[in-house]
Image (cartoon, coloured by chain):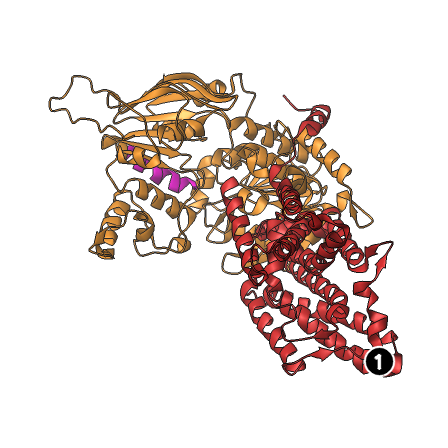
Chain colours: A orange, B red
């Protein structure tokens, strides 16, 4: 079956039909309905946001609209003509591009080679590198990407890779661009740049479908907002009519308690963790800090400012030096994940899928990998004890699963994050370092993780939170340290913790206290 | 909404078996039925014991390979290593035979275990400390071990001392309560392997390292140590196989253990262990070793295909097994 190409109409109709219209669209897998009754239209020159919790059906809707999956009910109408896409290539040919949430690029190829992968410009039998580089440079420039066509993708920071992905989608003229969580891996400055790109697309008359967990972005960008919940369409609203809180409440279907727990009284005890003169290769220099019981210490800064490097260095996960490290009053000699675990400190990585969980293994081995000794008796794994530990973790951390006999990769992002939390808590740490605690997870899970952090520190533990999300950093922390260029450059406590102060310090302003 | 542990437990029981895990056992059953149809003597007690005994060597070595492969490694050197260990063991036993008599067999066996462990450690350390692809490292040591055995036998045969033969014979030809000793030894190795992989901290870490070494590192697992130990286990298994093998032919030759790496890796892979690591299946490996030997035996019994083509058939099996794996996912 071929895709009917829309006929170019010679006389402009008074009101152009929407670029893409979904009518009563639905998808079932066997007896399970994952999406039903979605009717919405996306018009040329508008940014249409789709919001919903994880599992609400956003990804499924994206896949239906971009031809990756074929609908089981309803139909698509493009420019007034019914269409049925055989596959993603057919949808692309018709002018629909999907920018995936995950970075899907070949790391060892150049930017230009990635852009043209599978659709190389050829001259006779050979590929025309010069033409491809020229075209790549144009597209990259048009979205303000710093990457050059000849750069290896491997050498690019995450944010630039994301822009390369967007450039790939925009290589051919598009009618509809679908952006799935495009800012999940970006820091604030980069998010701004990306939002500019979206606005430029809108001005060029492209229809943009924008999926994001970050409600502030949706509020800033969207013309209209469609809310999904539990595979059902809740409605489409003009963006101007919804506040962020209203959006969140439509998503979860109930009134939200305060997203961030109330701040705690100033900590008084002796520091749980004291670090003096920590330097990590070229990534971070001479960091000194401490954290007290009952305290959430926030670490702010741009992506690339050395935050993750500093703490991976502290953990012994990358080469680092330190003058003095003391935990619970005891100096720590050799730093390794295992030694820290035994001493009472754990680090929860920002890279959930690559470094946090064994995606192809069951939940139980994932839960106990860090603290195997907890389920270990005289050389033998206590598997019933392990199963019991998993039941407790599922209940305590509210990991929502139909069965525990799943691979970790089958969980939603939010549930994966909760499993990871349960995993590091298996060793009863007194200090927990969490790198990007809520990256890419929905608002319901977010508030649960914030509550968890609050309960943790109220129980006399300490928590260090590294976050690129300003509201989170500001809403959660009792004290904030800001990193820039590998150094700790500013410290804020109490009322000083504001978006403006943190951004100013992170970007190089001089308001050191 | 939260899920109670009672609900979870109730769901445990209704969870179906995974067909992909049952695959090798179903395949083995099918081959047994087909074999019985082709030649009724295929399932006779003598023939079954013969097939199982012959498969013992590959099974024992393949248990070690299950550890190496599930930890994300690969060992191509097992066949040559087997020959090398056999050679060293015979030389030591022959040298000690005049002074120790049949006690030389015990010393030779112990020496075989030490040499096997050292060979495995060498493979493992070059892979982990040298950070070189296991494929390349063990391709190199495969050549080295093979050349060493050829050198040690001077291109011919290195036979075991006549005085030791009778005392050593039962290790391959003897039986306890009707069960041949190689089968008993392989059973012990299999049970130890299953215990180590499924019931101990080491086994859990082995699979974690194979599934994703970064996750393992971030979880405090000593990745290099776990990987090196897998090669040492492989070396020990090779040594045990060598100990069983010597009395069968009574000599080491430059062709001892040739192409065994093909059989061993085939047995592991058709047994359901993931070649990219992370998932080890001890009992699947055993089924894989039995499948290979049963097919070779059927080829001999049936005259349908020349027995010279056994290795070709095994090559086809590993490729077909991988294709089935690919297209049933």
Q: Residues within 10 Å of mark 1 (few under 14, many from 20)?
A: many
**Res. A432 in view:** yes
Percent x, y of residue A183: 41, 37
In the rendered view, does B162 fall on the left or right side of A401? right
- Is B17 situated above or below B194? above
In the rendered view, does A395 fall on the left or right side of A153? right
Q: Main secondary structure of the magenta part?
A: helix
Seen from this angle, which residue lies furthest left?
Answer: A11
Percent x, y of residue A12: 13, 21
Percent x, y of residue B64: 68, 58
Decide which of A219, B309 is in the foreground and name it.
B309
The residue range painted magenta reads A186-200
- Is A474 situated above or below A256? below
Percent x, y of residue A68: 39, 33
Decide which of A256, A380 is in the foreground and name it.
A380
Per the image, is A197 magenta? yes
In the rendered view, does B220 fall on the left or right side of A130? right
- Looking at the rendered image, the quarter that the N terminus of chain A falls into is top left
Per the image, is A95 magenta? no
Q: Which residue is mark 1?
A: B97
Q: Disc 1 is attached to a residue of which chain? A: B
């Amino acid at each position: 079956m071929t895709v009917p190409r829309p006929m170019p109409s010679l006389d402009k109709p008074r009101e152009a039909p929407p670029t893409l219209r979904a009518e009563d669209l639905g998808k079932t897998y066997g007896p399970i309905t994952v999406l039903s009754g979605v009717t919405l239209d996306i018009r040329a020159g508008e940014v249409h946001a789709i919001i919903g919790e994880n599992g609400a059906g956003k990804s499924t809707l994206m896949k239906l609209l971009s031809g990756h999956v074929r609908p089981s009910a309803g139909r698509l109408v493009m420019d007034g003509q019914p269409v049925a896409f055989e596959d993603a290539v057919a949808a692309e040919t018709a002018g629909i591009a999907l920018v995936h949430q995950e970075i899907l690029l070949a790391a060892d190829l150049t930017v230009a080679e990635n852009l043209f992968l599978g659709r190389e410009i050829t001259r006779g039998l050979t590929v025309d590198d010069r033409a491809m580089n020229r075209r790549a440079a144009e597209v990259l420039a048009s979205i303000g990407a710093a990457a050059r066509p000849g750069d290896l993708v491997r050498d690019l920071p995450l944010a630039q890779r994301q822009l390369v992905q967007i450039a790939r989608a925009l290589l051919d003229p598009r009618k509809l661009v679908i952006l799935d969580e495009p800012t999940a891996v970006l820091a604030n400055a980069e998010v701004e740049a990306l939002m500019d790109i979206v606005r430029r697309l809108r001005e060029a008359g492209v229809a943009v479908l924008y999926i994001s967990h970050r409600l502030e972005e949706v509020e800033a960008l969207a013309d209209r907002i469609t809310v999904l919940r539990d595979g059902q369409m809740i409605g489409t609203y003009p963006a101007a009519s919804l506040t962020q809180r209203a959006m969140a409440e439509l998503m979860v279907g109930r009134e939200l308690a305060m997203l961030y727990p109330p701040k705690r009284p100033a900590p008084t005890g002796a520091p749980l963790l004291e670090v003096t003169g920590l330097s990590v290769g070229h990534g971070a220099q001479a960091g000194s800090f401490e954290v007290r019981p009952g305290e959430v210490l926030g670490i702010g800064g741009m992506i690339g400012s050395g935050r993750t490097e500093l703490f991976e260095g502290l953990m012994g996960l990358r080469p680092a030096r330190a003058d003095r490290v003391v935990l619970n009053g005891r100096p720590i000699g050799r730093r390794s994940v295992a030694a820290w675990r035994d001493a009472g400190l754990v680090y929860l990585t920002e890279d959930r899928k690559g470094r946090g969980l064994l995606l192809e293994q069951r939940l139980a081995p994932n839960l106990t990998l860090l603290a195997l000794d907890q389920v270990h008796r005289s050389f033998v794994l206590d598997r019933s004890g392990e199963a019991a530990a998993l039941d407790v973790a599922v209940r305590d951390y509210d990991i929502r699963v139909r069965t525990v006999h799943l691979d970790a990769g089958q969980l939603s992002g939010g549930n994966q994050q909760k499993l990871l939390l349960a995993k590091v808590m298996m060793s009863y740490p007194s200090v927990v370092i969490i790198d990007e605690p809520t990256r890419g997870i929905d608002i319901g899970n977010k508030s649960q993780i914030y509550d968890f952090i609050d309960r943790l520190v109220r129980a006399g533990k300490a928590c260090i939170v590294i976050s690129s999300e300003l509201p989170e950093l500001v809403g959660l922390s009792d004290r904030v340290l800001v990193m820039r260029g590998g150094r700790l450059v500013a410290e804020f406590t109490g009322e000083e913790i504001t978006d403006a102060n943190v951004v100013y310090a992170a970007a190089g302003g001089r308001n050191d206290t | 909404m939260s899920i109670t542990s009672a609900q979870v437990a109730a769901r445990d029981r209704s969870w179906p078996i995974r067909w992909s895990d049952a695959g090798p056992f179903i395949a083995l059953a099918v081959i047994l039925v087909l074999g019985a149809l082709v030649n009724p003597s295929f399932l006779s007690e003598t023939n079954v014991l013969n097939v199982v005994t012959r498969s013992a060597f590959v099974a024992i070595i393949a248990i070690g390979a299950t550890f190496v492969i599930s930890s994300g490694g690969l060992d191509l050197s097992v066949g040559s290593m087997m020959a090398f260990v056999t050679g060293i063991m015979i030389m030591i036993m022959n040298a000690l035979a005049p002074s120790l008599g049949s006690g030389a067999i015990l010393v030779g066996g112990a020496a075989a275990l030490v040499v096997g462990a050292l060979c495995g450690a060498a493979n493992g350390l070059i892979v982990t400390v040298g950070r070189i692809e296991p494929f390349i490292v063990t391709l190199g040591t495969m050549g080295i071990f093979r050349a060493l055995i050829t050198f040690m036998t001077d291109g011919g045969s290195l036979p075991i001392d006549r005085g030791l033969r009778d005392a050593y014979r039962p290790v391959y030809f003897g039986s306890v309560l009707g069960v041949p000793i190689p089968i008993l030894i392989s059973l012990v190795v299999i049970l130890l392997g299953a215990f180590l992989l499924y019931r101990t901290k080491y086994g859990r870490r082995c699979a974690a390292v194979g599934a994703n070494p970064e996750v393992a590192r971030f979880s405090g697992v000593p990745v290099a140590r776990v990987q090196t130990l897998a090669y040492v286990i492989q070396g020990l298994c090779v040594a045990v196989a060598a100990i069983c093998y010597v009395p069968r032919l009574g000599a080491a030759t430059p062709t001892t253990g040739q192409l065994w790496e093909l059989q061993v890796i085939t047995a592991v892979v058709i047994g359901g262990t993931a070649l990219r690591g992370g998932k080890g299946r001890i009992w699947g490996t055993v089924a894989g070793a039995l499948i290979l030997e049963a097919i070779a035996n059927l080829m001999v019994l049936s005259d349908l295909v020349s027995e010279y083509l056994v290795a070709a058939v095994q090559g086809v099996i590993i490729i077909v097994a991988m294709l089935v794996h690919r297209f049933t996912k």
